[in-house]
Image: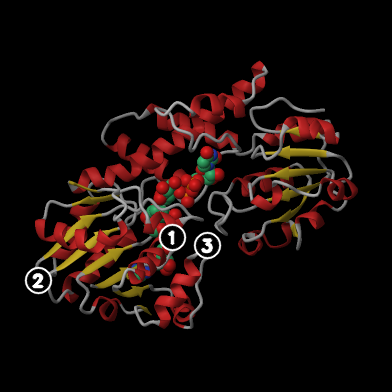
Amino acid sequence: MKIAVVGTGYVGLVTGTCFAETGNQVTCVDINAEKVQQMQAGKIPIYEPGLDDLFQRNTQEGRLHFTTSLKEGIDGAKVIFLALPTPPGADGSADLKYILQVANDLGPILSDYTVIIDKSTVPVGTSDKVRAAIAKNATVEFDVVSNPEFLREGVAVEDFMKPDRVVIGTQSDRAKDLMSRLYAPLVRQGNPIIFMDERSAELTKYAANAFLATKITFMNEIANLCELVGANVDEVRKGIGTDSRIGKRFLFAGIGYGGSCFPKDVQALAKTSAENDYEFKILDSVMQVNESQKTKLIPHLAKHFKGDLAGKKIAMWGLAFKPYTDDIREAPSLYNIDALLELGATVSAYDPEAMEHVKQLMGDKITFTKTPYEALEGADALLIVTEWPQFRTPDFDRMDSLLKNKVIFDGRNLYELNQMQELGYTYYSIGRQTIH
Ligand SMILES: NC(=O)c1ccc[n+]([C@@H]2O[C@H](COP(=O)([O-])OP(=O)(O)OC[C@H]3O[C@@H](n4cnc5c(N)ncnc54)[C@H](O)[C@@H]3O)[C@@H](O)[C@H]2O)c1
Ligand SMILES: O=c1ccn([C@@H]2O[C@H](COP(=O)(O)OP(=O)(O)O[C@H]3O[C@H](CO)[C@@H](O)[C@H](O)[C@H]3O)[C@@H](O)[C@H]2O)c(=O)[nH]1
């Protein structure tokens, strides 16, 4: 099938590449000329494990193409995916300007029946707006389908190629048939395609993200309580996660959720609720708790250094909002850096993938090192923000020789308490007792 994908961020690039891998002819369209040139030259603009191999194979075998021209990109396409940004507007609602602009542009250039698919995360009612924008100038029949994307950064290829489910919102049999054929190779494991109406599909995406953000936030609050009552959140997690009604995943307490999706989607769902005169109280709490959770370790740091962080050098391990990505959107690291600099500390940071992005954002406000150990040289303490696997089993002897003080503030609970006790560290973590 001939497919167009408009927007080549995480979602667009993964969608385009994976559908090329399943044998389709895909053209990706982006207004960013530099990015398109880079992709035409065989360079992938994002770090995503496993994607580069697929990208290279499919470009070299002639199934994956790139252009800045919408008209050229959609030529002959039976389906057009819109994988465009929906950033928060000034009032917290999702800004639809990118989607509606492309919908307006599509109307006059559609030349045959086409299915236009909202792959972006969009508020309830967007498919109607997209339909109306296209219909203003369209001369052919078309359908607009809501097909939200559930991939996680870092495991995006696996999530896309073997989805738990595919949600498709449409009431058109013609569109259903095309979508079923397109997704057939990806749902062979027996995972379902779930058809529903457009509005339910749009809301399903927000409900999934808000539920997961709530699950994490609930555990963060349990962790905060654990610290006060002398319990251990990791034990509590195992204790409840083994109940299949609760499930083991997304129960890890830490220094808050970040990324390009949870923060903006929880906010947008709260906004949708408010616009419909419904006060979604849980969401307000989730946002509030997450806000303070992100810098939860800073007061411990300040207290440890007797209220005076001025001139203290803090080593930071991890900048990306989570491992296996270079994405720093809404990353807790950024909030911690701001808080530390505000208190007069200096920061030397290491991250295997995300340093370049933080450098672009912060310039020389902090220093970046080539290895995690270099960041520790002469540091007064280590703050762990992202759980990259290489931080899990470090060379503690080497760390001892580099750190000025044996103090670790661990926002991701990487180490066992008894291990830290034996090694003689002062060790602060999340939802567990502090080791002195
Ligand atoms: N990042 C994720 O993990 C993820 C997962 C599921 C859903 N989503 C949702 O998918 C959507 C896209 O997210 P993303 O992270 O891929 O976005 P992104 O910001 O990384 O990329 C968007 C791309 O669209 C391009 N673009 C903007 N206007 C354009 C236009 N008029 N024509 C062509 N291209 C244009 C930009 O240049 C950019 O390359 C959002 O709604 C997001 O909430 C994201
Ligand atoms: O037990 C957990 C699990 C995650 N997180 C944090 O939650 C955030 C989000 O993590 P994750 O969901 O793995 O990453 P994303 O790539 O942002 O993926 C989410 O957002 C995407 C965009 O909407 C959706 O497609 C995915 O299904 C949804 O998981 C990160 O800051 C994690 O550190 C925790 O603190 N504890």
- Specify which label sits upstream in the sequence, 1 or 3: 3
Q: How many angstroms separate mark 2 from mark 3 (CA)?
A: 40 Å
> Is there a contact, CB below 8 Å, between mark 1 and mark 3?
yes
- Rendered location of residue 347, percent (x, y): 76, 51
Q: Residues within 10 Å of mark 3 (few under 14, many from 20)?
A: some
Residue 245's image quarter?
top left
Q: How many angstroms separate mark 1 from mark 2 (CA)?
A: 34 Å
Closer to the eye: label 2 or 3: 3
Q: Residue at x 43, y 28 (%)?
A: 246
* Left or right of 258 on screen, residue 349: right
Q: Given the image, on which type of amino acid does mark 3 rest?
A: Pro
Q: Given the image, on which type of amino acid does mark 2 rest?
A: Val
Name the residue carrying label 3: 49
Query: Regarding mark 1 in the picture, which secondary structure is present there?
Result: helix
Q: Nearer the viewer, residue 29 or 397?
A: 397
* Left or right of 351 on screen, residue 402: right
Name the residue carrying label 1: 157
Ligand 1: give its quadrant. bottom left
Q: Nearer the viewer, residue 327 or 90?
A: 327
Quadrant of the snapshot with the C terminus: top right
Q: Residue at x 50, y 25 (%)?
A: 240
Q: Seen from this angle, which residue lies furthest front?
A: 189
Q: Nearer the viewer, residue 288 or 63?
A: 63
Mark 2 CB within 8 Å of ligand 1: no
Check the image and report above or below for 287 versus 20: above
Q: Given the image, on which type of amino acid does mark 1 rest?
A: Val
- Rendered location of residue 71, percent (x, y): 26, 79
Q: Residue at x 34, y 52 (%)?
A: 121
Name the residue carrying label 2: 140
Is residue 86 visible in the rendered image? The answer is: no
- Rendered location of residue 272, percent (x, y): 31, 40
